[in-house]
Amino acid sequence: MSTILLALGVLTTGYSLWCLRCLQLNIAEAKRSGIPYVVVPVYTFNTAWLITHRIWLRLLSYLPLSWHESWSIHLTPEFAWNEKFEPFRKADCGLLLVVSPGRIIMWVADAEAVNQITTRRNDFPKPTELYGSVDLFGKNVVSTEGSVWRHHRKISSPPFTEKNNLLVFKESIRQAQSMISSWVTTTDQSSKTLPHIAEDTMRLSLHVISRAGFGQTLKWPHEEAGEVVLPKGHILSYKDALESLLQNIIQIMLMPKVILSNSPFKSQKVAKSAYAEWGQYMNELLVAKKEDIRQGKEQEGMDLMGALLRNSGVTSKSLESGASTATLSDSEILGNAFVFILAGHETAANTIHYSLLYLAMNPSSQRHLQKDLETQGFTSKNPEDWDYDHDLPKLFGGMAAAVMNEELRLIPPVVSIPKCTKTAQPLTLDSRRVVVPANTFVNLLSVASHRDPKYWLSGTQANDLNDFRPERWLVKSDQHEQHDAATSDGEDYGGPQGEDIASTLLRPKKGSYYPFSEGPRACLGRRFAQVEVLAVLAMVFKDYSVELAVDEFATDEEVQRMPVGGGERRAVWEKARKRATGLLKDGMGTIITIQMRDGTVPLRLVRKGRERFAF
């Protein structure tokens, strides 16, 4: 026993000395960098720390605050969302190093630095080791880097065109109509309380990308009639398999397939079944698309699966001869199809969800949007007659886009975009040269950049950068070019070619606003998501208003007895708004995208003119 204890003591001492030496070396690198830094005892993204950090942080909270106040905030995985721009304000710099024995982390908020890092993709590559979990069905455009990534990008980008976005526009309108009809009937003046708006917007976005991207039409629960007939060889419908896959995605991503396949627990059996079923559906679709190519058939619309096959070199001749001409394997095609659905539906769904929530919390901005839609002619025209080429530019250059842009400023799909350095890399900030140490884990903090007063303060609004104010995007004509418009680096990487923001709206400085990332690795589906969000916002607010539900604070009968526009109604509404504000501040968490994890904010849909809380 004494020998074992002695060995453990030696190992512990040796490990401690090694950690101390690594920390000393990393501190020396930080000092030479010219970048402000803070020292912490553990690498925040260490797997063991991610699993156990709540235990250690709770123990740390019992110590005097003065002992750890300056560095303990950096130990939580939700540091970026919790702190946003504040650490950079305190450091008086848009860069900040967090130095630990394991590795140096660099947090980035400065627009110049963001611009340099995203355009120098070879100097600041994506840390692909973080993305192995998305390779569920094969390598893809998200999980690769270098020449392999370029190859995936070239093959996967052609379907994302303006021509195909017409289908996205029409399908988004149709799905928005279905969502609204699931909330209210044509004769209802108001919906019942809607407790799970996030689930509804997730369903809507999933239906849009399934139909527009893969030709799979999905129905809402209230539209389904009778028993669903399952295809031969399946135990789940396509819709149920996909919804279950996405609901259980974290288990599927993180748990070894051997354990998942043999687990006795129901949740893991469900996850395994969803994974297998959706994979089978995708394989069947892949076979069907190859047969279409062999026969010379082409599907209208995006046809993501067919496009991936054709762009990778699959032809009718190669299929007939059996010769392999494809430059992507079947698993890589399935891998790209999966990430299109995974990333695409969450981005648009979250944007719609939080736009509805923010507008319910800010009735004056909601009225502004409704007035703009009325002026643009959306309220007087049947949605079936909305024209993509004529009507989308109105939405893209008006209050609807201002709402979307402001929501993405406050809650971008991901709060930080990871990069890394292999060797030391120089950056120039305000004519000052700094050096990012080698092997640094770099994080571009969109939630901080989007709140940098250096780029975002305007007029007399000095303290509104955490507030939802879409009107900040509606600038006078002589202010349209007050900031540099985002531009590409001149190299063609495929994907959307249009501007992120209409020329009639505020044009933030390049690197200060990047909800869809920046540079060559910017999101392929940006325009797809924008078209979907704008169409849904127009559909909802042309005829309806969205209000905070106050059931927790007053019954419908009690609200009815309160004078319209009076202090009692205002007080009840303010309680609901305060609760929503608290959840947006402290109830958010990141798994794949940033979402509300600690509760929900219930809403109600009411016809315009029948609002209960018109302030």
Image (spheres, grey):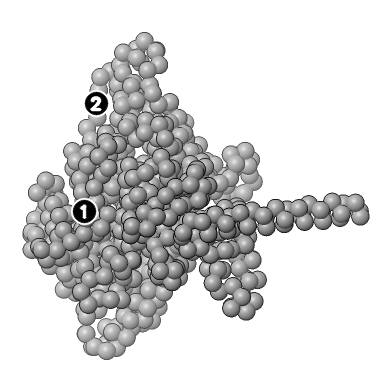
525 or 355, which is in the foreground?
525
**Mark whose residue sits in front, 1 or 2:** 1
**Residue at point 30% right, 21% down?**
293
Q: CA distance from mark 1 to mark 2?
A: 38 Å
Indicate whether 402 appears above or below 436: below
Residue that sits furthest to the top in the current view: 321
Residue 585 x, y percent position in the rendering? 41, 70
523 or 242, which is in the foreground?
523
Indicate whether 191 appears above or below 300: below
Which image quarter holds the C terminus?
Answer: bottom left
Residue contact at pointers 1 and 2, CB within 8 angstroms? no
- Label whose residue precedes the other's in the sequence (1 or 2): 2
Mark 1, residues whose alpha carbon is within 10 Å: few (<14), some, or many (≥20)? some
What amino acid is at disc 2?
Answer: Glu
Mark 2, residues whose alpha carbon is within 10 Å: few (<14), some, or many (≥20)? few
- Location of residue 416 by image quarter: bottom left
Indicate whether 615 appears above or below 450: below
Disc 2 element? loop
Q: Is residue 334 left or right of residue 64?
A: left
Q: Disc 1 marks which residue?
A: 485
Q: Disc 2 marks which residue?
A: 298
Question: Could one spot residue 385 in this view of the protein?
Answer: no
**Residue at point 61% right, 54% down?**
25
Residue 496 x, y percent position in the rendering? 25, 42
**Residue at point 43% right, 64% down?**
81
Question: Could one spot residue 72 in this view of the protein?
Answer: yes
What amino acid is at disc 1?
Answer: Ala
207 or 364, which is in the foreground?
364
Residue 103 x, y percent position in the rendering? 57, 53
